[in-house]
Image: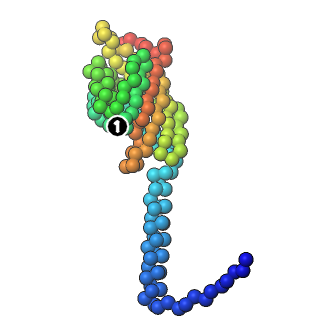
């Protein structure tokens, strides 16, 4: 096979400027596409992942089921102990409203571990809350939880799957 080298014919100054402009716009477009998502695709920090449950405890303590539900993705699944799976933000709001109506109070969370990659993360922790039983006694429940979180297009982390379970000996009446 024989390689043939051709000489380039000269181009006008206007044509050169047009080619240069197109090349610069193309490079600028590529650079802007690569720089904006870096923050969105960056691995999550522990603080980012812990914030959801801090805000969640704050919402329940404020008796605000709507604010609590807003911390879940629209299609989230809630897996409460001994109950059926709760699907979707609207049903999650109803679930937490029911808990508020039953007297949930003094909710606190403590993170044990976090991790993630890109737009997916998890948080493992311990919780404590008080609630009234059917006789009206206040019971303190202590347990553990796992949240699977997704970062939305707005950069906010929301729970997509939430599960918790009380410790078997954690119920104390007040």
Q: Secondary structure at mark 1?
A: strand
Is residue 62 visible in the rendered image? The answer is no
Q: Residue at x 29, y 18 (%)?
A: 102
Outermost residue on the right side: it is 1
Horizontal and vertical percent for residue 28? 45, 70
Is residue 92 visible in the rendered image? The answer is yes
Neighbourhood count class around disc 1 (C-alpha, 10 Å): few under 14, some 14–19, many 20 upward = some
Quadrant the N terminus occupies: bottom right
In this picture the colour scheme is rainbow
Horizontal and vertical percent for residue 81? 43, 19
Q: Is residue 4 above or below residue 163?
A: below
Horizontal and vertical percent for residue 114? 52, 37
Q: Name the residue nearer the viewer: 60 or 172.
A: 60
Residue 6, located in which quarter of the rendered image? bottom right
Residue 72, located in which quarter of the rendered image? top left
Outermost residue on the top side: it is 135
Horizontal and vertical percent for residue 146? 48, 30
Horizontal placement of 38 versus 104: left or right?
A: right
Q: Which residue is mark 1?
A: 74
Residue 104, located in which quarter of the rendered image? top left
Q: Residue at x 39, y 33 (%)?
A: 76
Quadrant the C terminus occupies: top left
Outermost residue on the front side: it is 1
Q: Name the residue nearer the viewer: 18 or 40.
A: 18
Q: Name the residue nearer the viewer: 1 or 100.
A: 1
How many marks the image carries: the answer is 1
Q: Is residue 132 above or below residue 126?
A: above
Q: Residue at x 30, y 35 (%)?
A: 67
Q: Is residue 13 above or below residue 89?
A: below
Horizontal placement of 66 versus 34: left or right?
A: left
């Amino acid at each position: 096979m024989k390689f043939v080298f051709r000489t380039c014919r000269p181009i006008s100054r206007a044509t050169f400027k047009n080619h240069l402009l197109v090349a610069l716009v193309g490079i600028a477009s590529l650079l802007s596409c690569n720089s904006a998502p870096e923050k969105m695709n960056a691995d999550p920090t522990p603080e980012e992942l812990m914030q959801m449950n801090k805000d969640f405890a704050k919402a329940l303590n404020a008796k605000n089921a709507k604010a609590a539900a807003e911390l879940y993705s629209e299609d989230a699944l809630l897996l409460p102990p001994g109950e059926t799976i709760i699907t979707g933000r609207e049903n999650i709001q109803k679930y937490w409203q029911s808990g508020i109506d039953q007297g949930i109070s003094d909710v606190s969370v403590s993170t044990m571990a976090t991790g993630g990659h890109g737009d997916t993360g998890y948080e493992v922790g311990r919780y404590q809350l008080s609630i009234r039983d059917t006789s009206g006694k206040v019971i303190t429940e202590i347990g553990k939880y796992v949240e699977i979180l997704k970062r939305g297009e707005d950069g906010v982390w929301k729970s997509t799957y939430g599960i918790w379970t009380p410790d078997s000996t954690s119920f104390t009446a007040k």
